[in-house]
Image (cartoon, grey):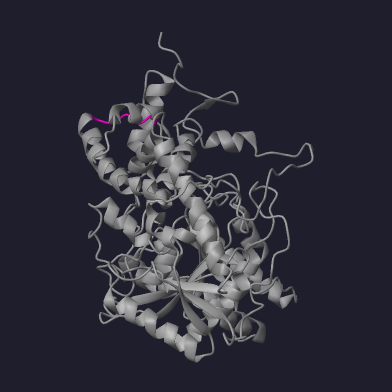
Amino acid sequence: MPVEIDIAHVAKLARLDLSPDEMEGYRSQLSVILDHAARVQSLEGEPEPDVTHPLGMVNAFRADEIKSSLDRDEVLAASPESRDGYFVVPPALES
Amino acid sequence: MATLSIVGAARAMRDGTLTASTLLRSVLQKASETEAQVHAYLNIDRTGAEEAAAQADADFADGIDRGPLQGIPVAIKDNMVTRGLETTAASQILAGYVPPYDATVVTRLREAGAVLVGKTNLDEFAMGSSTENSAYGTSYNPWDITRVPGGSSGGSAAAVSVGSALVGLGSDTGGSIRQPASLCGVVGMKPTYGTVSRYGLIAFASSLDQIGPLTKTVEDSALTLSVLWGHDPLDATSFRGDYPDPTAGLGRGVDGLRIGVVRELQGEGYEPDVESSVAQMVDKLSEAGAEVVEQSLPSFDIALSAYYLIAPAEASANLARFDGIRYGHRAPGDTTESMMSRSRAEGFGPEVTRRILLGTYALSAGYYDAFYGQAQRVRSAIRADFARAYADVDVLVSPTSPTVAFEAGARTQDPLAMYLSDICTIPCNLSGDPAISVPLGLDRNGLPIGFQVMAPALGEPIMYQVAAVVEQLAGFDASPELAMVAS
């Protein structure tokens, strides 16, 4: 059974500005891949989903000590635009 | 010299018959002879490497010995950050990114006196099985330059294969160390999940990713792992506990060990030369004293399906950080959101875009239970199958890849065919267990075949014990002849 995909919705969720042609290409490829992936539904029984660390590690806590972090100017130097110690972005809301 | 093993080079440097600087020169010479055809590297740091080699020589002269990797030329897959040295993960979205810090594995190598030669090519963000998804051009297989080296750590595998590094670091999410090692005729090993720090590894799928070594020999692999692994407070998944000695089982043979051949990793889709070569090795292991039995792990039949839901789901979350704000490519946009969406669409290549969409879909409302939730159930079944098998046998064996190296371009238009390259390697990522690929020999066309040895979590010593016997029984010591090199 072919898997139905609202590709425009998925692309919007993923923050990917794709053209209609690109979306159609991905939609048909994803349909084939998901058709294969749907084989997971053939698993017999219903084991609990396993999301544990293979070596049984649980939360890793550290002492609440102040340590030096990465140099701010060095970090900002990698950004496309920064000013006065801040990242600069276009307006978050449409005016 | 560039064909030396780590062990051989380390001995020669301590005998005084070889210096780190001479070794580096020979490795760089090898790179200059082969890079035009193989393209293993994205970036060679000649100056940094020469300084590190000089420092290693000064340390030797002063009687300072930092262990087996001192003075050894190392190649680093370009999804591990290196302070001051461009790191792109082979993506346009990170073009020009110069990290302000080192990954923990890089720090460990530097402290061990290793010489970092440069950054190797990969499939963009380690997503692929051929390096053809690199934004900076594909790498080629040294055994036949019309074929792929495998992936995603194809650059590191090719570099070790031709001798433009003595050891390469790779990362393995679904087979990205072992599969290229198999296709390039070198040893590639994925350690137990959580034993090698992932701090500074650009994340793909965090419940699956592990860093490991690609080397010429099994002993080199074990020695490199002993330097790489250990607890790191900077990685929250890092194992806090006792780490075994990876070299503890070397030389002990296989007499009395029980070896399981995985029934599900043979048959349809496996090339005849791969199957016969693996079967011959199994017979030899039996003759060497191992007790060989067949083991059935039925969930392996749907492991690939589960992987292609879990890995893209995690990737879609991990790659949300590439938003045009803190680093990398930024497209123009009137609002933050339009800037982000355009930056991401322009910066990511097709396979990365495909996996982000796939993962976003698998996690989205209405589909989560049927896809992602069910995939996690399959993961439970796979772990249960492994537990059942390891209650009976010491290690499991299989081919590393169902095929030898394929022609460049052969699978680029068929994502599913490309994904099938990883069918033998994916189960150990889903379980978190260690596994290694050891070269067996060449097929009828002169292309390498790899043999996979899998072991339970923290079973690296017995995995290496068996791998060393496989290496010895195979007696594979050929090197690729890039005879067509102009010089």
Considering every residue shown, the one lying at the far top of the view is A95
| Residue A18 falls within the magenta-colored stretch | yes
Task: Estimate the x, y position of residue B215 in percent, counting from the top left.
Answer: 50, 72
For the stretch drawn in magenta, what is the main secondary structure?
Answer: loop
The answer to whether B483 is drawn above or below residue B376 in the figure is below
Task: Estimate the x, y position of residue B388 in percent, counting from the top left.
Answer: 54, 64
Of B406 and B273, the residue lying toward us: B273
Task: Estimate the x, y position of residue B153 in percent, counting from the top left.
Answer: 43, 60
The answer to whether A36 is drawn above or below residue A66 in the figure is below
Task: Tell me where the magenta segment starts and ends, as one range.
Answer: A14-19
Left or right: where does residue B256 sit relative to residue A23? Answer: right
Of B484 and B354, the residue lying toward us: B354
The answer to whether B163 is drawn above or below residue A6 in the figure is below
Left or right: where does residue B60 sit relative to residue B24? Answer: right
Of B67 and B22, the residue lying toward us: B67
Left or right: where does residue A49 sit relative to residue B333? Answer: right
